[in-house]
Image (cartoon, grey):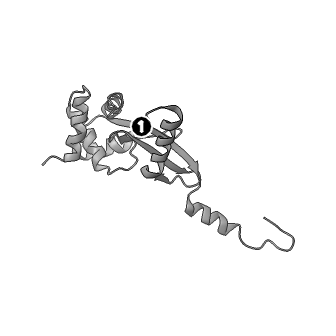
Amino acid sequence: MRDPKVEQVLDRLREGGGRLTRARRQIVEAMVAGDHRHLTAGDIVEIVRRRDPDFHESTVYRTLERLAELGVVRPVQLTPGATVFHLVEGPHLHHHLLCDRCGTVIEASDDLLDALAVEVGRTYGFALQSAAATLHGVCSACHEHHEHDHSHDHGAGHRH
């Protein structure tokens, strides 16, 4: 039985003028199986090879590049050297909050970012169709850990 989400992505691929190849189908299936995780090309290779051990790594890289050109996937560079791939699911804003201490990645709410799209449209007369950004900071767990480490008494006269 075919996955409706996979078929929906492949329909968009065909509508955009892309051919449906075995490699493209397997990569889209792997990305859907990744369940919205932040998948690197290496992650996708690993998922595809579970089903097809002879699948070449170079095919994954070439196919991801072509799928990005066709607008089916979007590469996002979270940190230097760490590119992840997302399936494009229509016009939307896609932002990540990246903790600079522990590397945790949080997907920012589309609702929160919709206000940005409205303001861009109002200010610049620009119909924003998609955007991706990585916002750097410190996650709540690291912030709490840092506050806890620095909350103990250092002695008389010491201030923070």
The answer to whether residue 109 shows anywhere in this view is no
Query: Which residue is labeled 1 in the image?
Result: 130
Q: Is residue 53 left or right of residue 115?
A: left
Residue in front for this viewpoint, 142 or 91: 91
Q: Is residue 158 left or right of residue 11?
A: right
The residue at the far left in this view is 1
Residue at figure coordinates x 52%, y 32% from the top left: 124
Residue at figure coordinates x 43%, y 51% from the top left: 111
Residue in front for this viewpoint, 123 or 117: 123
The C terminus is located in which quarter? bottom right
The kind of residue tagged 1 is Ser
Residue 74 in the image, given as x and y percentages of width and height: 39, 36
The residue at the far right in this view is 157
Residue 49 in the image, given as x and y percentages of width and height: 27, 43
Q: Quadrant of residue 68?
A: top left
Residue 59, relative to residue 42: is it above or below? above
Residue 130 in the image, given as x and y percentages of width and height: 42, 37
Residue 156, relative to residue 143: is it above or below? below
Residue at figure coordinates x 43%, y 44% from the top left: 94
Residue in front for this viewpoint, 81 or 2: 2
The answer to whether residue 17 shows anywhere in this view is yes
Q: Quadrant of residue 65?
A: top left
**Around disc 1, counting alpha carbons within 10 Å, would you say few (fewer than 14), some (14 to 19), or many (20 or more)?**
few
Q: Quadrant of residue 144?
A: bottom right
Residue at figure coordinates x 50%, y 44% from the top left: 116
Residue 29 in the image, given as x and y percentages of width and height: 25, 43
